[in-house]
Amino acid sequence: MSQRKHVPYDIIISILPKLPIKSIVRFRCVCKLWDSTITSSDFISTHLSNNNNNNVSDHGYLIHMPNVITKEATYSSSSSSSLSNPVCIVGCDPKFNKISEYRISSDFSREGSCNIVGSCNGVLCLADSSWNPTCLWNPSIRKFKSLPCLSEHQCVSAGFAYQSETNDYKVIKIYSTSEPYIKRHAELQAEVYTLSSDEWRRVGISLNLVRLKESYSSDTFVSGALHWVAWIKEDFGISRRKILAFDVNDEKFGEIAIPYGGKIHPEILAVIKGNLAFISSEFCYAPGIRYGIWMMGEYGVCESWNKLFTLRLGGFESIIGCTRHGEVIVKTAKTKYDAELQRGIHFVVVIIDPVTLNEKELIVPHFPTKATTFVESLVLLDENPDKKIS
């Protein structure tokens, strides 16, 4: 009998990080050595690096629908088993040709709804309907981790980021100390959660921050900082519209000027081609809404702001996000009946190339609110999450 040949362990280690997520997770059952290898922080980082260097596969977008979905919803009986979780997220490949659904556990969809604070390395930070961050969730491996309770102050905005220097993840909550939050007359403070310590800490805001604009975009993490549109008080009590930045490494707040002295009105912050960008609404005589797409060529340098495109949309259309390459993701008032699945009315999202004005339609099952980038990863696999979402 011929002797069984074994593949050298070094070769196995070089092959495993290149495999699909589902296969890797399944291979944890081979033996204890494979399990300890796959769940090690070094392996998880190597796999993530491979995916980030892959410009085609495993990179896509998530379109969030926070609608309440109940078991009494009017779907066909064949699909009733999928109604146990009330919030739906649709994942798309880079070309928006492939759609897959992820459903968030009802444990984290209080009041039948939740929000996406941000997306980093395949992990989503989820918040309740009041924007209080509640958990971290990796839909690729169906694991989540609850965040510890924080102060009861009303959350104004939140952010989620990856700290590359320490290979750690941080959640920041900006909150008001006055109840209820009055936009123009409230003291704003901040707390930061770090995954490695599993604790919240208070951080100071040195700027005279007046208020924040409600954020409809998740992708505001660029150049090691999170960003929000804010009103900051300057000399003589004058408040100007600027971009508030939070450096996740030194945990300090700063400000970035908006073109033309803040007279432009940014509606959505975004990341385009790795640069900070924003979409502004502009006055338009014709029916509909006109948007300007701006990008900062050199981070932190106001003079490097450059207007890339102007895009005009219908009155019932609005932008919910951008792709990495600057295509605009738009929710419309159009609906279509899904005859194949017999699941009733679906909504139409349009992806527009602002250069060629080419459009691609994407059909989603519920009314979308925002779009964010996404990449499959094993992050959180080495954590001790609360439980697996099946």
Image (spheres, rainbow, N blue to C red):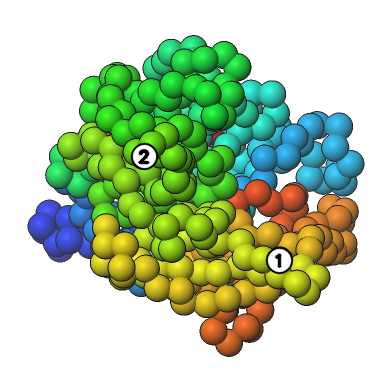
Residue at 78% of width from left, 63% of height from top? 315
Of 208 and 353, which appears nearest the observer? 208
Where residue 94 appears, as percent x and y from the top left, is 49, 69
Residue 289: assigned label: 1
Residue at 75% of width from left, 72% of height from top? 285
Horizontal relation, residue 167 to residue 201: left or right: left
Where residue 292 appears, as percent x and y from the top left, is 55, 69
Where residue 83 appears, as percent x and y from the top left, is 74, 37
Check disc 2 and give the amino acid type.
Glu
Mark 2 sits on what residue? 234
Sequence-wise, the earlier of marks 2 and 1 is 2
Horizontal relation, residue 241 to residue 171: left or right: right
Q: What is the spatial separation of the Cα atoms under label 2 and label 1, in whole angstroms? A: 31 Å
Of 60 and 290, which appears nearest the observer? 290
Name the quadrant of the C terminus. Answer: top right
Name the quadrant of the N terminus. Answer: bottom left
Q: In which quarter of the image is residue 137?
A: top left
Of 342 and 138, which appears nearest the observer? 138
Q: In this view, does 124 lie above or below 110?
A: below
